[in-house]
Image (spheres, rainbow, N blue to C red):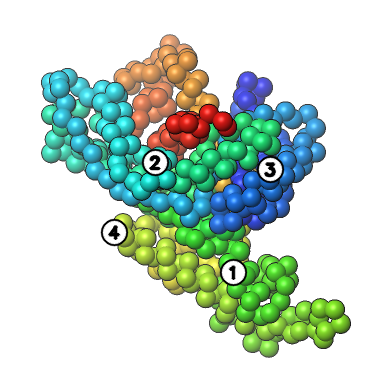
Amino acid sequence: MTNEQPIIVGLDIGTTKIAAIAGRKNEFGKLEILGFGLASSTGVQHGMVLNIDQTIKAIETALKNCYASNPGLEISEVYVGIAGHHIKSLQTRGDIVRRSTEDEIKQFEIDQLINDQYKTYIPAGDQIIDVIPQEYTVDNIQNITDPIGHTGVKIGANFHIITGDRNAIRNINRSVEKAGLRVKDLMLQPLASSAAVMSEQDIEAGIAILDIGGGTTDLAVFYEGILKHTAVIPFGGENITNDIKTGLGVLKTQAELMKVQYGSALSDVAQANAFIKIPGLRGLPSKEISVKNLASIIQARMSEILAFVTFHLKQVGLDNKMLNGGIVLTGGGSQLKHLIQLTEYATGLNARIGYPNEHIAPNQIAELEKPAYATCIGLILKGYNIHENNQNRLNPPANKVKSTESTASGESTEEIVMRSVPTKGRKTLGDFMNSIKDGLIDLFKEEGDKQL
């Protein structure tokens, strides 16, 4: 079975790094990593490609390093993450009146309801990236997870709409294609990271995923199995590094090193009498930097990011009593010392680090179990979700049954129902993956964009 599964490649184009990871699912449904390449990112700022030539070179370097890790690999297409402060979200409401009110609701009616949301007014230059349905209603019945099979006069739903800048997304596509690859599909980075670090229990309990990247911090909030909110906060690890550089009068490389090796998100726990010795430039005397001052600078910026998180949670009516799963911190910036304590203090929610090993087979490359690679692993998982859905469309499973009788094979039909029919009233990780739009890249190849 392993040999039948395709090799899927995730490409994470970040502000500080570009990562390419090739993976394939084994017979247990876990990812085996077949290749891994990394490169420093210089053409990207705040998650947006600003210098296409530099980004192309970085992608080529990451690809070269991926091939070096496994010379037998052949990579032609990739799943790419999108982020940046141009990503915005809004909530809408949609309703349609049915023609045949006595018939059961069919999938095409749900599709029409979703497609109508693509006509929502958004500012010029932006484009709707994804329309994610939340709770459905049929007539006066509220909070329906799956309306198919119900009868009624009117179907409605609340929608979470994600928008992005058309040119920013085209720049990603151009960079990848000029590096000799094809973009198989795009996925919003906070959703990719969420898929990599969440479990079924998390999505049921209610959880906020906070992906602290180099240029931006991405937030995805789930409640009662539904994606309630996404936001891109325009600060990340780079801002902390720049604050240290400015505040302590050191080089950027020194600031980054101090942040990683000696940094803390809580100044109260930093040693008051501890100092870091920095060599002087060109014969100038060396500097002594207070560890406590360093922690104060980091805490100030992280507190600002967490204030945004609290604001967004209040905006969607989810205070700290409602998210039983708390906050999951992931991304490279989540590894700051004492960040869990600061997060719990600032938000009033339990916090933990989210590692992308939930879906990775054991005994893989240890480096890839770090939170910094959550987005890339999530992109591979989304790639598999699309592949498996396509396979199911081509070969519909013969075992899609609705009774609980035993089958000829001796396998319990109840288990088959659990696999092939959505469980009423309960959302799973698979449902979440299916709700994210496939074929997103095609949206940005329309309307005079044939030159790509």
The image position of residue 295, as x and y in percent, is: 60, 77
Q: CA distance from mark 3 to mark 1?
A: 27 Å
Dot placed on the residue nearer the N-terminal end, 2 or 3 = 3
In this rendering, the answer to whether 393 lies above or below 370 is: above
- Residue 109, picture quadrant: top left
In this rendering, the answer to whether 304 lies above or below 401 is: below
Q: CA distance from mark 1 to mark 2?
A: 31 Å
Q: Quick one: SS at disc 2?
A: strand
Dot placed on the residue nearer the N-terminal end, 3 or 1 = 3
The image position of residue 398, as x and y in percent, is: 42, 14
> Cβ–Cβ below 8 Å for labels 4 and 3?
no
Which of the numbered marks, if any, corresponds to residue 220?
A: none
Q: CA distance from mark 1 to mark 4?
A: 29 Å
Q: Quick one: quadrant of the N terminus?
A: top right
Q: Mark 2 = which residue?
A: 128
> Cβ–Cβ below 8 Å for labels 3 and 1?
no
Q: Residue at x 47, y 14 (%)?
A: 395
In this rendering, the answer to whether 147 lies above or below 4 is: below
Around disc 2, counting alpha carbons within 10 Å, would you say few (fewer than 14), some (14 to 19), or many (20 or more)? Answer: many
Which of the numbered marks, if any, corresponds to residue 317?
A: 4
> Cβ–Cβ below 8 Å for labels 1 and 4?
no
Q: Mark 3 = which residue?
A: 56
User: Which is nearer the eye, 22 or 283?
Assistant: 283
Q: Mark 1 = which residue?
A: 240
Around disc 1, counting alpha carbons within 10 Å, would you say few (fewer than 14), some (14 to 19), or many (20 or more)? Answer: many
Observer able to see residue 224: no
Around disc 4, counting alpha carbons within 10 Å, would you say few (fewer than 14), some (14 to 19), or many (20 or more)? Answer: few
Around disc 3, counting alpha carbons within 10 Å, would you say few (fewer than 14), some (14 to 19), or many (20 or more)? Answer: many
